[in-house]
Image (cartoon, helix red, strand yellow):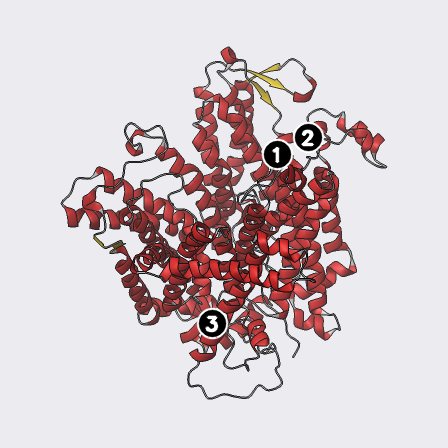
Amino acid sequence: MIDTGTGTGPEVRSPADVQRQWKLVGLFAVVALALVWFWIDIDDPTVGYLLDNARGEDPREINAHVVVVGSLVVTVIALALAAVNRIPSGWPTVVASLAVGLAFLLGFLVWNYADQSGTGFAMVNPLPGTVKFAVPLVFGALAGCLCERAGVINIAIEGQFLMGAFWAAVVASLLSSAELGLFGGMLAGVGMGALLAVFAMRYLVNQVVLGVVLIALATGLTAFLLSQIPGDPEIRARLNNPMTLGPVPDADIPLLSPLAGALSGIPVIGPTLFDQTLLAYLMYVSVIFVAFLIFQTRWGLRVRSVGEHPKAADTVGLKVNRLRWQAVLLGGVFAGLGGAYFTVGSNGAFTNDMSAGNGFIALAAVIMGRWHPVYASLAALFFGLMTTLSSQLEFLGKVPSSFLTALPYLATIIAVAGLVGRVRPPAADGEPYVKS
Amino acid sequence: MTDESTSAKRSDSDEHATDVHEAAPGSVDKGVVDRPEPDQKPEPPAATWLPDAITTFASIVLALLVGAVLIALSDEAAVESLGYVFSYPQDFFYFAGQAIWDSYSSLVSGSVGSIDAIGITLVRAAPLICAGLGVTLAFRAGLFNIGAQGQLVVGALFAGYVGFTWDLPPGLHLVAAILAGMIGGALWGATAGFLKARTGAHEVITTIMLNYLATRFLLIYLLSKDAFQRPGSDNAQSPRPADSARFPEIGNVHLGVLVAIAAAIVVWWLIERSTFGFELRAVGANADAARTAGMSPARVYTMAMLLAGLLAGLAATMNVLGKGDSLSPGVAGSIGFDAITVALLGRATPLGTVLAGLLFGALSVGGTAMQASAGTPKELGDVLQALIVLFVAAPALVRGIIRLRAQGGGATVMAKGWGS
C-alpha cells in the first residue's frame, strides 16, 4: 500500500493518495473504453445539430467520429497522467475529472445522435432545459445551505416546496397574477421555516425527525386543503387556476435590459441564460446574493459561527438563536420560491405531491455541494442536465428510455461515491443551543 | 477541532449506551443542559416510562383536537353557521360537534370497532412495523435510512417473481418467496451501506437516489418485460402470486402479522442482547470511539443497512404474499416513507415501533372509514399522523400545554445530525 511503482520514486505516499490515484485511473479507463466502443459502434457519423433551437435555423452538420476521437484523446491523456501520478490532488484533479466528464458527455451525445440520418433528428442545445429543471433545485439548495450553515438541519425542503407551490397557486389565482403568486409561495415557505425554527429551537425537537414530520404535515395539509376546494369549476377557477410565468422579454429586465439584450444574442449560452421565466432570473440573483451574504458579510460570518461553534459565538455576545431564526426564515423565502416553480412557474394548477421528490434532490445537492451555495447550485444544475438529457435522448432509441430515466439518479450516486466522498457538515449542524 | 469537540460530547453520551435514544438533543452536550424549568427536581428513577406514556397520550389527544378543528372547518353546515355565529352560536357548535362526533366515531369503529376492523388494521400495520423496524435498526447505528421505499420495491420484485413463476410445494414456496423478498431488500439496502463504508458517500443521498432507481426505473423497466407481465393484460401489472406462496389466513388476517411481531422480537434481541447489537449501538453513539475499541464502523454500517433492507424486503412480502397484491407501479404505496415516521414515533425502539405501526395502521384504516361514512376527507388521516408525531417529538411543548412537571429526560428520538 506504500508505493504503486509508477515511476515517482520510492517516497512514502499516504494510502488515501494511492486510493485517489487508483480511483482516477479506474474512472478514466472506464470512460476511455466507453468512448472506444462509441467509436466502433457509430456507422453513419453525420450528426445534425442546432445551435439555437428557438430561432428556426437549419441544422448544421458535424462528424461524430471526429468528436469521439477528440474526446478519446483528452481522456487518454488524462488517463496517462493519472497512471504516472502526475495529477496532484486539489484543483488539478477537479479540472481533469471535469475534462474527462465533458469528453464522455460529448462522446455519449454524438453516439446517441449518430445513425439517425433517416429520421432527421438534430442535436438540440440541452442547456435551456437544464436551467429550467434546475430552478426549483437551486432554490431548495439555497434554503438548505442557509439553514444548515446556521446549524439547523433542513430536511423539510420538500414540504416547503409543496406548501410554496400550493399557496403560490392560490394567491396567483385570487389576484390573477402569476408574479404576485410568487409572494404567496414565499410566505408559505417562510411559514414552514417558522415551524421548523420554533420546534427546533424552542421545543428542541430533533431536527432530522422534525424535517420528516414537516414533510408529512405539508403533504397531508396540501392534499387536505386541495380536497376542500370544491369541485365547482367557477370556484376552482378562482382558487386553483393560476396563470403561469411566461418567458421574460429582454426589454423587461429592469436596469439590465441593454446588457441582457446583448448577452442573449450570444449563441448557445444566450438562450440558455436569458430565454427563461422570471424565476430563473431570480435564481441567478439569489445564488449570488446568498453566496455574498454567507461569505462576504458580517451577518454571514456570524451565521457560520453559530453553525460551527454556537457556544463560542454566544461567548462573544452573538444571539445564537436569533441568528438561526433569521437564517431559517430567509431560507424559507427561497424554498417557497422553489415551490412556486411547480405551479405558477411551470404547470399552473396545484396537484397532490407535485414536487415529486425534488426537495430530496435539492437536499442531495446541498450535501454534494458541501453546504456551499455556489457548489450546491452547480450540483443542482448537474441534476438538471441529466434530467434534460434523459428526456431528449428518449426518442433516439439508442438507449432504452427506462435506462435514461435512471440516468440522473445513477449519475448522482456515481458522483457522490466516486468524486465527492466524505463531506463535513457544519460542526453544530442539528444541535440545538440552550444558553446555560 | 471538530473531532475533539464531537468526541468529547459523544463520550458523554457513551454512559447512556444502553438507552441511546435518551441521549437527546439538549442533554447531550456538557455545556448544553435541558431547558431550565423552575420546579425541576431530581425524581426517583422508578417508572421512567410513565411521563413518556403520558406525554405520548397527551400528544395523540392534542393532535385529535387540532384534527377536530379541521373537521369542523371542512363541514359545510358548520362553516355556513359560522356566518351567523354571533347571533346563534349554538348552531355552529351543534353542527361542528355533530361533524366531529361522526368523523371520530367512524374513525374508531372503522379501525378497532369490530373483529373485522381490527383484522384490517393488523394487516395494514404489519408492513409498517417491518419496514419501521428496518429504519429503527439503521437509526441505532447512527444511519438515517430514507431508503425503505426502494428496498420495499426491490423486495416486492424478488418475492413476487418467486411467488408467481416458481413451482414448489405450498409451505416451501412461501418460505422461498419470503427469503427472496428479504434478499432483494437486503441487496438494495446493503448497496447504500457498502457505498458509505467504502467511499463515505452519505447514506441520505444514496438511499434517496436508490429509491428513485427502484421505483422509477427498476420496477417500471421490469414490469414492461415479458417475465413480469400478466398474460392478457396491457397494464404494467404482474400475475398474482400463486396460492402456494401466500401467507395462510385466519379470518381476514394473514399470518404475516405474526411474522412482523416475530421480526420485532428478533430485532429487539439483536439490538439489545447480541454482540452485533452492542457494536451497532456503540458505532451509533460514537463511531470514533468504537473504532478505537477495535470495532469496524464500516462493517457495522454495511451490516446495519443490509439488515434494514432485509426488514423492508420482509415488509414487502406482507402485501405481495399476504394480501396477494400483484406487482404494479404502486406496489409499495408510501409504506417506505410512513415507515420513517413510524420509527420516529416509536423512538427507535422495537416495542415503540410495533405500537406506532399499529397506531398508524389504525389511523390509515380509520381514515378510509371516516371518508366512507362521515364524508371527512381521507387526507385528514395523514394530517393527524403528522401532528401526532410532531407533538410526540416535542415533549416540551406538550408538557407546557398539559402542565405536566418535567420528569426524566424528556427524550425525543435519537438520531444525530448528519453524522460523519
Q: Are marks 3 and 1 on the same chain?
A: no
Q: CA distance from mark 3 to mark 1?
A: 49 Å
Amino acid type at mark 1: Thr
Badge 1 density bin: few <14, some 14–19, many ≥20, Cα 10 Å:
many
Left or right: B289, with A145 as reference point:
left
Residue B280, position in %: x, y? 39, 66
Amino acid type at mark 3: Phe
* Foreground residue among A165 and A10: A165
Circle 3 sits on which residue? B57
Residue B232, position in %: x, y? 29, 27
Find numbered disc 2 in the image and state the secondary structure of the residue it sits on: helix
Who's the residue at 70% across and 38% down the image? A280
**Relative to B365, residue B345 above or below:** below
Q: CA distance from mark 2 to mark 3?
A: 55 Å
- The number of discs equals 3
Left or right: B91, with B23 as reference point:
right
